[in-house]
C-alpha cells in the first residue's frame, strides 16, 4: 500500500438529523449589510429598523368622493380659487379654511381643507345648482350623517413621524416593501444575500435528450440554481467538473490554479453535487482533505442523503456537498443548505412543524427518514416513491415527514418540513 495515499474510512455518519440542522444554522454568521432599492429588497433581511420618515398618512385625506363640509346643513358650495386641476386635488391650494355652512367638492384621497369637519359621500348629498350651489343631505343619508370626522383619514393615524414600522431582522415580504414606500423610503439596508457558487460533478450526466444505459439526465442544472434563489441565495457561478481529483481540488482551492477554480467567484457558499461517496471515483472527501477544509458535518444519520457534508475552507467559504442521488440531494438541501443560508441571512432557524401520521411506519435503527408525503384529511401519508433516486414522491408532496428511527404509529404527531415552493396543502403548524 502506498503510504502517501489518503486513507478514506467507511462512512459512519455520527451527526443526527436534528444536530445537522442546528449545526448548519449555527455555523453561519450574518453577512454585512448593503443598501438596495426597494424593488430589490424582497426576501432580504432588514438590517436595521425602518421608521416612518414622516407621519403616515402625511395629510388628512378623504376616504370617499363627495364634499368636505363644516357645520350643519345646508352648505353653500365653495369653489376654490383657482379651481384645482384633477391632479392637484391632493395639493395644498392656498384655500382659506372652510367656514361653518360651507362645503367643497372632494375626491377620494383628496386633501381635506382646514375647517372641514366631515365628508358627505356623493350618493348621500343633494346638490341644488345655482350661484352659489347649495348642498343638503339626501334622503338616502343616515340620520346622523355625516358624523364628526366621518370619511376623513386623519394624518398620522397609521404611524407618527419617526415611529418604527418594520423591525430589524424581518425577512421582507411584498407588504413590507409597500409599507416602506409609504413610509418614504427609496432604499433599505438589507443583509447581503449569500452568494452561492455551484459545482456539478458526474461524467455520466448529460444535459439534454434521452440518456443511454449508464448515463443519467441532469436533474440539478435545470432547478437547483432557482431553488437556491427561492431559499434566499444569489447564484454566482454554475460550473460542471470532470470526475478527476485534481480538478475537484482545483475547484475548491483558495488559489486560482486552473480553469476549474472557483476562487475568484466570490461565493460565500460552494454547493457541490455528487462525489460524496467513498469509491475511487468520488473525490469530494479527498479534495476537502487536500485543501485542509474543516469538516463541520461529515455525514448525517438520515436516509436518504447520509453522505452529505458541510465544510469550511481556509478562506471562510462554506462547502455544502450534496449526494448525487436526486432525492438525497434535495433532502440534503433542506437539512443543511437551507439552515446555513438562513444563518447567513441573519434569519432565525426554521420553525418546527408537525403532522399527524396517517399510517404506521416501522423503525429504522440509527436513521432519521425524510419521506415526501401527501396530506389528506389532516393526516400525512408517506409516498411510495421515497428512494434516493426517485423524484415522483417529492414532486407530488405537500411536505416532507421527518420520521424518527423508532418509526411511528398512525395518528402520532411527527416532525415535518414544509416545502419552499407553493403546495396544495401546507402542513399544520
Ligand atoms: N459502498 C457504498 N456505496 C454507497 C454508499 C455507501 O455508504 N457505501 N452510499 C450510497 C448513497 S446513500 C449515496 S447517496 C451515494 C452518494 O453518491 P455520491 O454523492 O458519491 O454521488 P455519485 O456517486 O456521483 O452519484 C450517485 C448517483 O447519482 C447520480 N447523479 C449524479 N449527478 C446527477 C445529476 N446531476 N442528475 C441526476 N443524477 C445524478 C449518479 O449518476 C449516481 O447514480 O452513494 C451510494 N453508494
Ligand atoms: O443516503 Mo443515499 O443519500 O440513500 O441516497
Image (cartoon, rainbow, N blue to C red):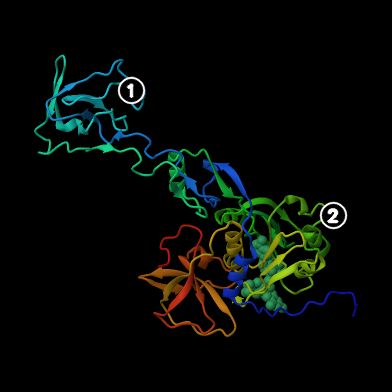
Answer few, some or many: residues within 10 Å of disc 2's Cα (few below 14, many 20 plus, some between 14 and 19). Answer: some
In the drawing, what numbered circle is on residue 151?
none
Identify the residue shown where x is 82% and y is 67%. Answer: 290
Answer few, some or many: residues within 10 Å of disc 1's Cα (few below 14, many 20 plus, some between 14 and 19). Answer: few
**In the rendering, at what x and y percent does residue 427 appear?**
42, 67
State left or right for residue 70 relative to residue 112.
left
Quadrant of the snapshot with the N terminus: bottom right
**In the rendering, at what x and y percent does residue 178 appear?**
44, 43
- Residue 326 seen by the camera: no
Above or below, 19 relative to 205: below
Q: CA distance from mark 1 to mark 2?
A: 66 Å
The residue under label 2 is 257
The residue under label 1 is 86
State left or right for residue 195 relative to residue 114.
right
Instruction: Name the one closer to the observer, 391 or 53.
Output: 53
**In the rendering, at what x and y percent does residue 233 appear?**
60, 54
Q: Is mark 1 within 8 Å of ligand 1?
A: no
Identify the residue shown where x is 54% and y is 50%. Answer: 48
Identify the residue shown where x is 49% and y is 50%. Answer: 172
Amino acid at each position: 500500500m502506498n503510504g502517501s495515499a489518503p486513507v478514506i474510512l467507511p462512512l459512519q455518519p455520527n451527526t443526527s438529523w436534528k444536530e445537522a440542522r442546528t449545526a448548519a444554522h449555527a455555523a453561519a454568521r450574518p453577512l454585512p449589510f448593503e443598501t438596495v432599492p426597494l424593488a430589490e429588497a424582497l426576501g432580504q433581511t432588514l438590517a436595521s429598523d425602518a421608521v416612518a420618515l414622516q407621519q403616515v398618512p402625511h395629510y388628512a385625506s378623504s376616504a370617499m368622493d363627495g364634499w368636505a363640509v363644516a357645520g350643519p346643513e345646508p352648505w353653500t358650495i365653495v369653489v376654490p380659487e383657482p379651481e384645482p386641476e384633477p391632479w392637484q386635488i391632493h395639493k395644498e391650494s392656498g384655500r382659506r379654511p372652510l367656514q361653518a355652512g360651507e362645503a367643497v367638492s372632494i375626491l377620494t384621497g383628496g386633501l381635506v381643507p382646514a375647517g372641514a369637519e366631515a365628508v358627505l359621500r356623493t350618493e348621500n348629498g343633494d346638490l341644488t345648482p345655482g350661484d352659489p350651489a347649495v348642498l343638503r343631505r339626501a334622503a338616502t343619508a343616515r340620520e346622523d350623517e355625516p358624523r364628526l370626522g366621518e370619511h376623513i383619514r386623519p394624518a398620522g393615524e397609521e404611524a407618527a413621524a419617526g415611529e418604527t414600522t418594520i423591525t430589524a431582522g424581518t425577512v421582507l415580504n411584498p407588504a413590507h416593501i409597500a409599507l416602506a414606500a409609504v413610509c418614504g423610503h427609496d432604499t433599505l439596508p438589507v443583509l447581503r444575500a449569500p452568494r452561492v457558487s455551484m459545482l456539478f460533478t458526474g461524467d455520466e450526466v448529460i444535459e439534454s435528450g434521452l440518456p443511454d444505459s449508464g448515463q443519467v439526465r441532469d436533474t440539478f442544472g435545470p432547478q437547483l440554481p432557482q431553488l437556491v434563489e427561492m431559499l434566499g441565495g444569489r447564484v454566482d457561478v454554475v460550473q460542471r467538473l470532470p470526475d478527476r481529483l485534481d480538478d475537484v481540488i482545483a475547484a475548491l482551492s483558495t488559489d486560482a490554479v486552473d480553469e476549474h477554480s472557483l476562487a475568484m467567484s466570490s461565493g460565500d457558499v460552494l454547493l457541490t453535487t455528487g462525489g460524496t461517496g467513498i469509491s475511487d471515483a468520488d473525490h469530494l472527501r479527498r479534495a476537502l482533505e487536500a485543501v485542509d477544509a474543516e469538516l463541520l458535518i461529515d455525514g448525517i444519520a438520515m436516509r436518504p442523503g447520509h453522505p452529505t457534508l458541510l465544510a469550511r475552507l481556509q478562506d471562510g467559504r462554506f462547502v455544502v456537498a450534496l449526494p448525487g442521488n436526486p432525492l438525497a440531494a434535495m433532502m440534503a438541501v433542506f437539512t443543511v443548505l437551507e439552515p446555513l443560508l438562513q444563518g447567513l441571512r441573519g434569519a432565525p432557524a426554521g420553525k418546527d412543524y408537525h403532522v399527524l401520521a396517517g399510517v404506521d411506519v416501522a423503525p429504522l435503527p440509527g436513521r432519521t427518514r425524510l419521506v415526501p408525503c401527501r396530506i389528506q384529511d389532516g393526516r400525512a401519508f408517506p409516498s411510495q416513491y421515497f428512494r434516493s433516486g426517485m423524484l415522483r414522491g417529492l414532486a407530488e408532496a405537500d411536505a416532507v415527514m421527518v420520521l424518527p428511527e423508532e418509526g411511528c404509529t398512525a395518528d402520532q404527531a411527527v416532525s415535518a418540513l414544509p416545502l419552499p415552493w407553493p403546495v396544495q396543502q401546507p402542513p399544520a403548524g
